[in-house]
Structures are given as C-alpha cells and as structure tokens.
C-alpha cells in the first residue's frame, strides 16, 4: 500500500504540478491586468473586468470541448491507440474553431451590445467596448491553441504544454507593463495596451503549438481528421461532450449572472468583485490541476480495463482534493492583508467590500476543490458527464441565482451578504455529489 501511494504521488507530481502552474500563470495575467489598470483608475479596472466576461464565456465552450477531448483521449492513450487521439484532436478543433469565430465576430462588430449585458454604466461600456474590439482576434487563437495544449497534457507532454503556456503568459505580463504605462519608449495606451498585449501573447502561444505540431510525429493535426473524421468517433465525442457543454454554459451563464448582479450594485462592488475573483482564481489553481489530473489518471486506468484500481484511485483522490482545498483556503486567508495592500487605490467602500469577499473566497476553496475533482475529474473520466449538467443546472438556476436576485434587488441586503449567497454553489451541491459518487456508475471503460 505504501508503494502504491508513493507511485500515485509521483504521478500526481509529474501531471498535476505543471497543470497547476499553468493555471496559476494564466490567473497571473488577470492579476497583472487588475494591478496595472488599478494604478490608472478604478473605471479602467472595472471595465476590463466586465469585458473579460466575454472571454470567460468563450472559455466555458472551450473547456467543455477539452473535457470531451480528455474523456476519450485519456482512455485511448491508456489503451495505446495514438491514431484515435489524432482523430479526436481533429474533431475537437472543428467545434472549437467554429465557436471561436462566432465570439471573434461578436467582439469585433457588436462590442457595445456585449458590454450592455454586464453593466448600464456608460463609461464602463465605452471603455470595455474598446478593449473587446482589440482582443477579438485572440479568441480565435485560443480556440486552436487550447485544444492542442489539452491533447499534449493527455499524451505525457504536460510539462512541455506548461512551458508553452507560460511563455505566452510571461510575454503578456511584460507587454502589459510596457504598453499600459508606456515604459522604455513604448506608447502609453492604457486599456488598449492591455488588449494588444493579450492578443499578441495569444498569437505567440498559437505559433508555439504549431511549432510543437511540426516538431514531433506522434500526435499531429491532420487535414483528413479535420475534414473527414470517423463518424462513429464523432458521435462518441458529441455524446460525451454535449452534457459537459450544456453544463458549462448553464453554470457559466449562472456565474455570469452573478457578475451582472454585482455589476448593478455600483462601481465599488464591481471593482472589489473583480479583484476578489482574481484572488479566487489564483488560489484555485492547485484544486483545478488536481481535478484535471485525476480525470487523466483514472481515464488511463479505465481505458486499460483496470476498473477496481480506478475505483480505489477515485477514493484516494477525493481525500486528496479535500486536503488541497483546505490548503488553498489557508493560503488565501493568510494572503488577505497582502491583497488589500495591493488594492490600495480602491475607494474606502470598495476596500471594505474586498476584505469581506476574500474571507468568503477562502472558504469557497474547499467546496471548489472537491467539486472539480469529483464532477470534472472522476465522473468525466468514466464518460459520466450528464450528472454535472443536471446537478449544476438545478443548483445554479433554482437556488443560487434566485437567492442572489432576491437578496440584491428585493431585500436590499449589504453587498457582502449578497456575495456570500452567490458563492454557496459549491457547498449546496456537495451532499448530492457524495451520494452519486458512492453509486460508482462512473467506473466503466468507454473505448471501442
């Protein structure tokens, strides 16, 4: 048993650490945007935070495509069928490129309409619309690069995937400082500089994935797989992806609705919420990495037909996820004074809102870690993507969003109380997750 645990932790270290680092680096971009734009003024910070919701919604689509990609790729990789993985990549890119083009077009031609969804403040709409026009092309870049990086994680190239993603992140942060403030002779562009930095870094990330595709010969993007993938495999992909897509969109729209609620509670609430969300995302990096790594490890075992081994692994990962959530909670809690210090340019009212929000986010980590591992990792590894759809739909739209609307617009509760109710989603569904997990319907081999 001791030897098995040692092997497990070694696999987790090799797989999860790069993913957690990549998640952290991605969250660091948002943090740098907030920190640098916060030095300009609070309106710039709030506008970019709200405009970023468009990218967030796109990431929900891309996230669901990558879940479907991982469900199949993890099991077929465990089975040793590399040709199938190339076909899965081709199928995934067909969907991701189409959706990314739609978002690119919307951001280019209807940015004002998109901003009006999130706020009624004319200044924030104007600033956010200018940001969206410039970042529009980056959505298409994301649609290609993120799917390829996902396949790399599923084919024993997680460290290399993290390296490519990290290069793009570091470039983004560097360009942010140069173009937002106009350092070393560069023009001082403010919000436009942040947008240009994002687009350039996403373009570089795409170039790196093309380089990796040409460099190695194991898993490549093939024109035949893009245009004429096996029909039965595409049906399998859709079968496992559509519940995840519906889940991501429904949950994401509910999450976006919480941003809309906060957006109508004043610019102080928006500014505090934007920084709290960044802190939450950075703290959740390890939890999300464990969830993704769990899905890959269990998927590999299921693909090889090791059902009982996968079951035991799932039990261990549930405990590890709770420990990781508790650790993330303590880390964020201990960093509250540091975050408040960096947010010194906020108004006194926004500063008080932020203090309360960070306390709530700290506790949120425990539920987030468990849910990411169980729903996003374990259930998906066995092809069970429908439970998450049903659970999140009922939880978000029948409990959390109605509670938020009631608290904000009818009971007129204080902003921190509204924020607390909007962040109960991971805990209200935890009892149902545990009940469903113990039925072990996810323990199955889905390869053909």
Image: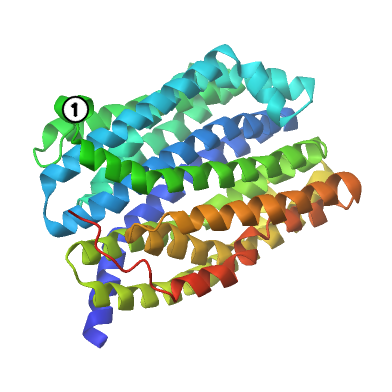
Residue receiving disc 1 = 228
Q: Residue at x 84, y 47 (%)?
A: 408
Q: Residue at x 50, y 25 (%)?
A: 178
Residue 158 in view in this figure:
no
Q: Where's residue 195, x and y in %?
A: 53, 23
Q: Quadrant of residue 382?
A: bottom left
Q: Residue at x 76, y 21 (%)?
A: 123
Q: Where's residue 359, x and y in %?
A: 70, 62
Q: Residue at x 69, y 53 (%)?
A: 398
Q: Quadrant of residue 39?
A: top right
Q: Is residue 318 above or below residue 44?
A: below
Callout 1: helix, strand or loop?
loop
Front one among 439 and 203: 439
Q: Is residue 320 above or below residue 349?
A: below
Give the residue furthest to the bottom: 1
Q: How is the image coloured?
A: rainbow
**Count of picture labels:** 1
Give the residue furthest to the top: 109
Q: Is residue 322 left or right of residue 409?
A: left
Q: Is residue 50 left or right of residue 162?
A: right
Q: Is residue 161 left or right of residue 168?
A: left
């Amino acid at each position: 048993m001791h030897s098995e645990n040692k092997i497990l932790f070694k696999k987790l270290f090799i797989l999860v650490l790069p993913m957690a680092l990549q998640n952290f680096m991605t969250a660091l971009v948002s943090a740098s945007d907030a920190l640098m734009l916060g030095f300009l003024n609070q309106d710039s910070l709030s506008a970019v935070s709200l405009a970023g919701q468009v990218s967030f919604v796109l990431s929900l689509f891309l996230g669901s495509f990558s879940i479907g990609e991982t469900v199949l790729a993890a099991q077929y990789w465990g089975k040793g069928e590399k040709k199938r993985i190339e076909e899965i990549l081709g199928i995934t890119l067909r969907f991701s490129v189409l959706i990314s083009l739609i978002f690119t077009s919307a951001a280019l031609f209807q940015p004002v309409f998109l901003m009006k969804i999130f706020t009624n403040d004319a200044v924030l709409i104007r600033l956010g619309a200018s940001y969206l026009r410039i970042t529009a092309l980056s959505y298409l870049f994301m649609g290609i690069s993120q799917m390829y990086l996902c396949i790399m994680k599923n084919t024993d190239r997680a460290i290399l995937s993290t390296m490519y993603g990290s290069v793009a992140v570091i470039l983004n942060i560097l360009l942010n400082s140069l173009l937002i403030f106009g350092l070393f002779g560069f023009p001082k562009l403010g919000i436009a500089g942040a947008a240009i930095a994002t687009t350039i870094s996403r373009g570089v990330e795409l170039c790196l994935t093309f380089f990796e595709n040409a460099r190695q010969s194991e898993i490549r993007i093939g024109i035949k797989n893009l245009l004429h993938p096996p029909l039965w495999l595409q049906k399998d992909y859709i079968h496992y992806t559509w519940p995840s897509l519906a889940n991501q969109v429904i949950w994401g729209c509910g999450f976006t609705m919480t941003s809309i609620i906060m957006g109508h509670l004043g610019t102080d609430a928006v500014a505090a919420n934007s920084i709290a969300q960044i802190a939450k995302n950075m703290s959740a990096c390890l939890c999300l990495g464990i969830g993704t790594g769990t899905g890959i490890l269990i998927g590999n075992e299921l693909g090889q037909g090791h059902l009982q081994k996968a079951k035991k692994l799932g039990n261990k990962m549930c405990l590890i996820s709770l420990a990781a959530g508790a650790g993330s909670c303590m880390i964020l809690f201990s960093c509250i004074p540091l975050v408040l210090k960096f947010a010194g340019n906020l108004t006194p009212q926004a500063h008080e809102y932020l203090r309360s929000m960070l306390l709530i986010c700290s506790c949120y980590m425990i539920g987030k870690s468990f849910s990411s591992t169980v729903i996003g990792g374990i259930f998906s590894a066995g092809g069970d993507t429908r439970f998450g759809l049903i659970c999140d739909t009922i939880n978000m739209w029948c409990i959390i969003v109605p509670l938020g609307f009631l608290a904000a617009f009818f009971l007129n509760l204080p902003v921190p109380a509204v924020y607390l109710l909007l962040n109960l989603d991971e805990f209200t569904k935890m009892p149902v997750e545990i009940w469903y997990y113990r039925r072990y319907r996810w323990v199955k081999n889905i390869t053909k």
